[in-house]
Image (cartoon, helix red, strand yellow):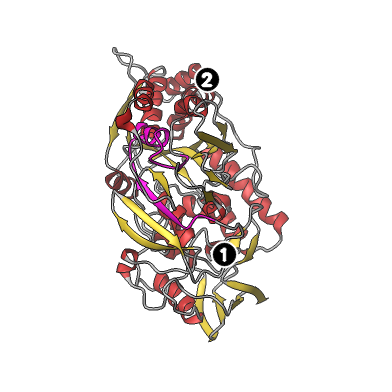
Amino acid sequence: MWTLIGLCAALSGCQAKRRDPGTAVFLIESSPNSLDPRVGTDAQSERIDPLLFDGLVARDEHYQFQPALAASWETPDALTLLFHLRHDVRFSDGRRLTAADVLWTLESMRDGTILTPKGASYDSVASVEAVDAWTVRIRLKEPDNFLLGNLSSSAMGIVPAGSRADFWRHPVGTGAFRLVSQETDKEVVVERNPFAWERATVPGALQRVRFEVVPDATTRALELRKGAADITSNSLPSDMLPVLKRDPKLVVEETGGTPVQYLAFNLRDPVLGRRVVRAAIAHAVDRRLLVRTLLGGEAQLAESLLPPTHWAYTDDVKRYDYDPAKARAMLNAAGFPPGRDGVRLRLTMKTSTDEGTRMLAVALQQQLAQIGIALEIRSMETATFFSDITRGAFQIYSLRWIGGNEQPDIFSYAFSTVRMPPHGANREHYANAEVDRLLDAASRVTEQQQRRADYVRVQQILAEDLPMENLWYLNSILLHDRRVTGVKPSASGDYLFLLNAKISSLQ
């Protein structure tokens, strides 16, 4: 792999092609599934949408809410929120934003006008009312501590009134950028929104970004080294980083990240539905070795879905240290002795074609073989993979929570009985009445100390029941050409650093 890169640097035929000097080329692994912020839940949609759209509020680096499209808000009582919109906001086509747009956005997700898993996030809403052109009143059926998070720019975006199911083709938002063009499996091009209410604070900030879809990691590295691209974020295997760090034309920047990799089990499966099997698998996975070998140390072990800096986080939970002897003893006691070929169980892990996930699957295959579990790996195209896990056609899979795990609503979305697909992401079909009760209580009570106590107990129960195993938090790593300045990676891996990035002319 790296021989090819070295050859490329030496050959004139690998010189970068001529391109617009005012456009930063940003390499991404796949196309966003939908640039409708009411719909897109995949990583690229959730990272590009906040460049194009704004929510009513925004979250800062401390997970606290700040004004966005709403200049201010108030809660006259526990069942009412009143949002006061900015008067100077226009969509990227020049239309003025009013309360009617907020009303349409929320109602279209709630009434089925738009088919979206995000609609369930507003189940607590009884009504949405445009009090006047600049004021929106939301009345609740019951107190909901998560609603502000679900109205934030990281979760949704306000669209023009009347936007229907085909809005994703030509999205119009209020964000710092606007869409120029998009072509599936090729590129998404955005440019500065001349009507943006929140403008760059850095003189000479870049004006245009072309998100180029390059599925292969080696090709992404080649494109960066030969100067055909400028930026990529969290898209390269860790074993490439040492070589790239030595390239004088490139800069590698990193910080501790919040995206968490997890291993999920289908609890409706007759074998994986038994907790002892899941626990044995957890004891057979050497997470420290995988972080060191697969990730080059660019990750931290995770004991929860929440980031360690979150006010509701706890690591006072049951742990599954690497202990294959204990795992084998557990399987023996559970009635799964090894056969003549040494195999106790045959299981299947489904993955997308993402290289990092496939490498993880191969490593897990080797580690589980040590306790007598034969793991078959089935890799498939991303859309098919997501379709299978959503409808429960899997035994084991691994994915990452990106951004959504930065608020405790993740526990409801991923583990509540009422959040099984298509109403949420409880793809494991986990059901625990005590967890449901605790999550319901935490969503209603306003006193943070009591909410934390409820969430701590939820994390402890989940660690005991093990519907999924938390593996690690991935470091956030940004790789860019030295011509790009004013950028730094965020813990969540979002692309908001582009708002104040600068790019010098091509040499």
Q: Is residue 137 visible?
A: yes
Report the front residue among 241 and 399.
Answer: 241
| Mark 1: secondary structure | loop
Circle 1 crowding by C-alpha within 10 Å: few under 14, some 14–19, many from 20: some
Residue with the mark numbered 1 = 199
Tell me the quarter of the image containing the C terminus: top left
Q: How many marks?
A: 2
* Residue ranking furthest to the bottom: 132
Please, what is the three-letter code of the amino acid marked with disc 1? Arg
- Based on the picture, tell me whether residue 229 belongs to the magenta stretch: yes
Q: In the displayed structure, would residue 281 be above or below residue 32?
A: above
Please, what is the three-letter code of the amino acid marked with disc 2? Asp
Q: Is residue 335 visible?
A: no
Circle 2 crowding by C-alpha within 10 Å: few under 14, some 14–19, many from 20: some
Q: Position of residue 64 (x, y in %)?
A: 66, 58
Q: Position of residue 99 (x, y in %)?
A: 51, 80
Marks 2 and 1, how far apart at CA = 54 Å
Residue interval drawn in magenta: 205-234
- Based on the picture, tell me whether residue 323 belongs to the magenta stretch: no
The label on residue 50 is none
- Horizontal placement of 456 versus 252: left or right? right
Residue drawn where x is 29% and y is 49% of the image: 186
Earlier sequence position, callout 2 versus callout 1: 1
The label on residue 323 is 2
Report the front residue among 94 and 48.
Answer: 94
| Mark 2: secondary structure | loop
Q: Position of residue 22 (x, y in %)?
A: 44, 53
Residue drawn where x is 48% and y is 50% of the image: 415
Residue drawn where x is 37% and y is 66% of the image: 171
Select label 2 or label 1 by which is in front.
1
- Horizontal placement of 348 versus 150: left or right? left
Q: Position of residue 468 (x, y in %)?
A: 47, 39
